[in-house]
Amino acid sequence: MPEAPTISIVMPVFNGAKYLRHALGSLSSQSPHPARLEIIVAEDGSTDDSPGILRDASAALSITLIEGARQGNWVASTNRALQQATGDFICFLHQDDAFLPARLKALMDAATLFPDAHVFAHPVRFINGAGKSCGTWSFPAKRLRYRPSNATSHLLHLANGKRITVHRLPPSGWLPQLVVQNNLAVPGVMFRRSLLDSVGYLDKTLRYTADWDFWLRLAARHDLVFLDTPLSEYRVHREAQTVGFAEKQSEYADNLRIALDRHLPVLNGLADISRREADAFRAMAALGIATNLWLASRFTANPQPAATLVRALRAVGLWNALRYLRLSRVFPRALARLRANVNTSAQAEDESS
C-alpha cells in the first residue's frame, strides 16, 4: 500500500499568544488526524508567551521550530518556513486563524479525486476576536458569465455523511475572477510543494498583497480544485494587519497596483477569454483597487470621501460595475469585518463593565 502523502503546515508566528493555542488546537482536532503531518513554525522573536505555547504543543504535534534574527515581516517568515517544508502538500495557517476538523481529510480526498491537480481551495468562515462567526469569504466558482470548456464538477462524500460539491476550473475559470478581487483566504488554500520550483516563493516586498500575488502566479499555470464549503476560520480583529494599518495606506495602494500590473497581461493569453472580455476584467480590476482602498480608509482617521468611489464606479460603466459587485463579493466581506469590529467592541465594553 503506498505511503500517505505528507502535509506541511507553514506558520509564521510573532506575539500570537492570544489566539495561538486555538490555531494549534485546530491541527490536533483534525478528524481523522493525518498520519504524516509536519508543522513548520517560523518564530520571529516573540516577546509574549508564544514560544512557550509552541513548546507545550510540540508534545502532541510534530513541530519544527525555526528561530533566528527578527524578520519583522510575515512574508519573510513564511518563506523561511517554506524552505524547510518537506511535505507533498503545503497549507498556510496564521496564528490567529484555525482549520475546521474535517479540513485536511476533505482536501486529501479531493487530491485523490484529482491526482493530477496542484492547487486546492475552499471558502473560509469569518470569525471575530471571540470566535463568533460573522460571515463567509468565498470564491465565485459558480458565478461565471461563461463556462470554460474543460470545467468540471463532482460530489465529494465525507465520512460524516456530508457532501461537498467540488469544481475543477482551468486558468480561464479562476484567474480572471482572482484579478478582479482576491477571494482566496490564506487558510483556504492547499498546493503541491513542487510548484515552488516553477512559481517561486512569496514576494516579501508585498507585505499586504503577497498572498494575492502568489495565488495569481498559481492561477496563470494551473487548474483550481474548489471545494464549495467553508473548511477554515479567518479571524478579523483589531490587532490584525489588514485592519489596523492607518499609517500604511500608501504602501497598501502600491502593493495592490504592483501585484495587478504583474498579472493583467496574462489575461490576453487565456483560452476561452476574448479580447473584449479581458478588457472588461481589466476595468473591473481597476475598480477593485479603488474600492479596496476606499473601504480600507473607512477604518482610519482619514477616510476617503464617497465621491472617490462614485467616480471609480462611473469610470467602468454600469454593466461592469454591477459585474464587479457580483464577482468580487466585496461588500459581504466588508460587512463581515464591520460585524467583527462591532462585536469585538461590544465584548470589550461588557468585560470592562
Image (cartoon, grey):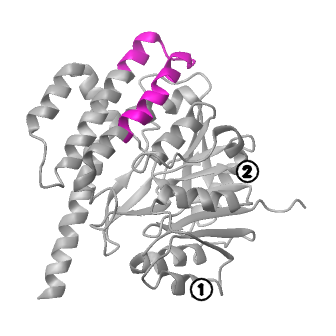
Residue displayed at 50% across by 60% down: 231
Q: Which amino acid does label 1 sit on?
A: Arg
Count of marks, rendered view: 2
Q: Nearer the viewer, mark 1 or mark 2?
A: 1
Q: Is residue 319 magenta?
A: no
- Is 2 placed above or below 13 here? above
Which residue is at a point 22% across and 72% down the rendered structure image? 344
- Work out whether residue 328 can be spotted: yes
Percent position (x, y) of residue 230? 46, 57
- The residue positioned 50% from the left and 17% from the top of the image is 273
Q: Mark 1 points at which residue?
A: 55
| Residue 155 x/y as whole percent | 60, 47
Quarter location, residue 336: bottom left
Q: Is the magenta stretch mostly helix, strand or loop?
A: helix
Q: Which span of residues is magenta-colored?
A: 255-280
The crowd level at tag 2 (other Cα within 10 Å; few <14, some 14-19, many 20+) is few
Q: In which quarter of the image is the N terminus?
A: bottom right
